[in-house]
Image (cartoon, rainbow, N blue to C red):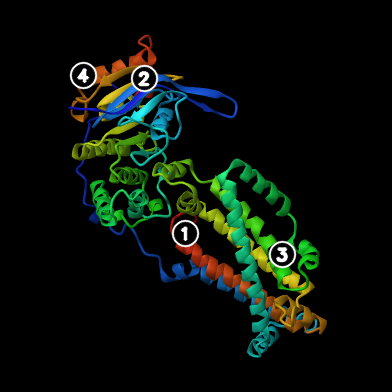
Amino acid sequence: MSSTLLEGTGVTLQYKTPRHLVTATYRVDFSVHQGDRYVILGPSGCGKSTLLKAVGGFMSPVEGEITIRGRKVDAPGPDRMMVFQEFEQLMPWKTVFQNVLFPMKVTKKFPREEAISRANSVIEKVGLSKFKDIYPHMLSGGMKMRVAIARAMALEPDILLMDEPFAALDALTRRTMQQELLSLWDQLRFTVMFVTHSIEEAVLVGSRVLVLSPHPGRVRAELDTDRLNYSNMDQVEFGAMSKRIHDLLFGDKRKPAGAKHGAAA
Amino acid sequence: MTVSARPEFEIEPTDSVSIGDVERPLSLFERIWTNETVQRFAILVALIVVWELYARWLNNSLLFPTFTETIRTFWKDIHNGVLVNRTLTSLRTLALGYTFGLALAGLFTTFAVASNIGTRILSTLTAMFNPLPAIALLPLALIWFGLGTPSLVFVIIHSVLWAVALNTLSGFRGVPETLRMGGRNVGLRGARYVGLILIPAAFPSILAGLKIGWAFAWRTLVAAELVFGVSSRSGGIGWYIFEARNELDTATVFAGLLTVILIGLLVESVIFRAIEARTVNLWGMQQ
């Protein structure tokens, strides 16, 4: 029943630093289906954030191409809403409500009345109705992140792009946010592309996991983790999947004691 | 035996009501004394008392008139309209120069953010002209525009333009990448991108530029009027001070200086303070 929404074929990405030309990913293929929670997982420096930026249209591949619903991606657009890792992605000069309303106002995707009611309902869904007239600087990190997610979802994009959205949160808030994202997904069944460097988060949050090898990023595997979630976190299957991903990333010669990267959650 | 050979336990959470007052309002005295307006006012009163005492002890109104004498002259000249007229003349010129300066600064910075070469041009120009005192351009302005308002406006524009442009540009450069990407994500470009994302995001710097520009402009204007203040019989506040000095009327000189200071305080602590309270303070971009 699922159909391909977003497709990347042979995507090679390069960017320039003042001294070097860096190849971030090399001939990466991926296809994201409608309703996927598609996770890009890899160690730092594997070009996963760069890949997400390319999907967002902020940079173009030097080789290969990315298409969404068959159209080539060549510029940023409101059909692919980005949620960033940083807290300061909210506009400090707008209240929570105005922040959520802003993309709908600018893109004129919905009539004014509808935009307002959509903003209200999505703010309620992320549990921030009490804070809707407050400026972002008075919110905690987790609340800011929820507003950012609400803002992106209110616009009903084809796909939600999340660049390590929970990485800057403390571990407990992070766990709550993962659960909230999943319960929101249960309600709304949006498509999300999610970048992380935590194996546990990938297995928990994702329904598909694209494992990238380090520098430059190449596809190592694409795994199905749809049936793994909180309820079976303590079971063998979950552990086996985590171990399998760990071995894909670090090679099975290393001892699990070196699993520090994967354990961060 | 392992190292943690102690029994485990769990406790049910207690009701937080039983803890007592978690937050206590500050006492009236604490609130009044920490109020900024009150503190500023106290400082002003202290300065005035010192002035009055020193002037009375010196007892030479030609050198240093007392506060009461200055205030008397100040009231007299406000009542007979001289000081009001002079001040209004100055403020009109100032408003003209300030507005033109801001418009030009806006034009320059929009051009500068649009392209790399624009940025280079603006930073070179500001590096050249920002350190050049506006008053040093006055002789040149007099040759170009003659004795009168256009010359004054010219030097005011010079004093405003570079300070504001420099601050605005550095503010634009400091806008976080995520905010920029967020703006481009929803398809903002060109003037809408500058107006909806860059200007509000860089507002603390822009406001700082506006304040510096205002202070430069006011200073430059008064100084320029001291050099040549009178044009078609309507001199400004600088000319008022200059005239009084020629007549060795020191109390009037003081009254003129007091006016300059009062207007400076008014703009800074009423107009700019109000803008700050409604913008950068409200948004938490500045404490």
In the depicted view, which residue is nearer to us: B95 or B237? B95
Q: Amino acid at mark 1?
A: Asn
* Residue where numbered disc 4 is placed: A237
* Residue where numbered disc 3 is placed: B155
Q: Amino acid at mark 4?
A: Glu
Task: State the CA–CA distance, disc 3 to disc 1.
Answer: 33 Å
**Contact, mark 3 vs mark 1 (Cβ under 8 Å):** no
Q: Mark 3 vs mark 1: which is more N-terminal?
A: 3
Say which chain tag 3 marks: B
* Residue where numbered disc 1 is placed: B281
Check the image and report above or below for A114 versus A148: below
**Contact, mark 1 vs mark 4 (Cβ under 8 Å):** no
Quadrant for the N terminus of chain B, please.
Answer: top left
Is B177 on the left or on the right of A127, as rendered?
Answer: right
Q: Quadrant of residue A252?
A: top left
Q: Quadrant of residue A80?
A: top left
Task: State the CA–CA distance, disc 4 to disc 2.
Answer: 18 Å
Residue in the picture at 60% in, 26% down: A19
Say which chain tag 1 marks: B
